[in-house]
Amino acid sequence: MALAEKLKLSADDYLQGEASAQIKHEYLDGDVWAMIGASDAHVSIAGNLFFLLKQHLKDSPCRAYISDMKVNVAKANAFFYPDVLVTCEPKDRDNRLFKQHPLFIAEVLSPSTEGFDRGAKFAAYRQLDSLQNYWLIDSQSQAIDCFERTEQGWLLHSFSAAADRLPLGTLDINLDLSAIYEDVLLDVADQVL
């Protein structure tokens, strides 16, 4: 028996299917995969970060979004559901299904997604001209890798001390690492998804 050829899906077909899907899917250049459920630590970290950003952005033109809002990376032919994103672009307000001009994206890492979040997903996100900051937040230890776009390229700052303050210059905010991990029960390596 011959193996079936893997079919590629167009972005329009993906969006049409996603509009009525029971579960979320991400899309990269024709490939589609289902999003799995998240751990307590994952959800708590994303919720804390979203809350901190939403409070800071009140009465500003910027909006924070949590995991159910898609980001379209047109240059990579991709749609992703980042854990947290911020956009200040007026054009993004008009599109209720996805955003195209985020300046901040954060992904909460799990063992099953860390390689992709650090590799192919970050490579796609770097094609967003608007993106200034990309954070990778560990769910097994209090550690955050903060990538910042500079004129020379992407600069990495790593934080792991409870007293650390994480700068987001584009949003004129410094966030306490301890506040991002507040009330979080970290994942234990053998108990994560």
Image: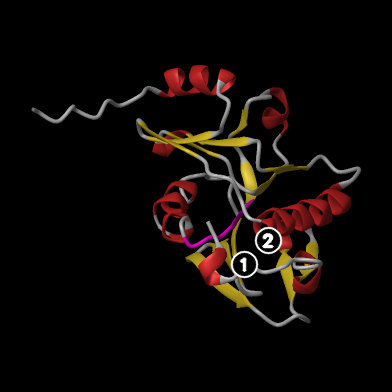
Position in image of residue 184 (x %, y %): 75, 66
Q: Which residue is mark 1?
A: 187
- The image shows a total of numbered marks equal to 2
In the displayed structure, does residue 95 sit left or right of residue 23?
Answer: right
Q: Is residue 62 visible?
A: yes
Position in image of residue 54 (x %, y %): 83, 48
Q: Quadrant of the N terminus?
A: top left
Q: Are marks 1 and 2 in contact (CB under 8 Å)?
A: yes
Badge 2: how crowded within 10 Å, few (<14), some, or many (20+)? many
In the displayed structure, does residue 128 sit left or right of residue 88?
Answer: left
Q: CA distance from mark 1 to mark 2?
A: 6 Å
Coloration of the structure image: secondary structure
Label 1 is placed on what type of residue? Asp
Considering every residue shown, the one lying at the far right of the view is 59
Q: Is residue 171 visible?
A: no
- The quarter of the picture where residue 49 lies is bottom right
Is residue 126 one of those drawn in magenta? no
The residue under the point 57% across, 18% down is: 20
- The quarter of the picture where residue 42 lies is bottom right
Q: Is residue 151 above or below residue 143?
A: above
Q: Is residue 80 above or below residue 160?
A: above
Position in image of residue 182 (x %, y %): 80, 67
Is residue 110 one of those drawn in magenta? yes
Q: Which residues, given as a range, are shown in magenta?
A: 105-111
Point out which mark residue 41 bears: 2
Residue toward you, 162 or 129: 162
Residue toward you, 186 or 151: 186
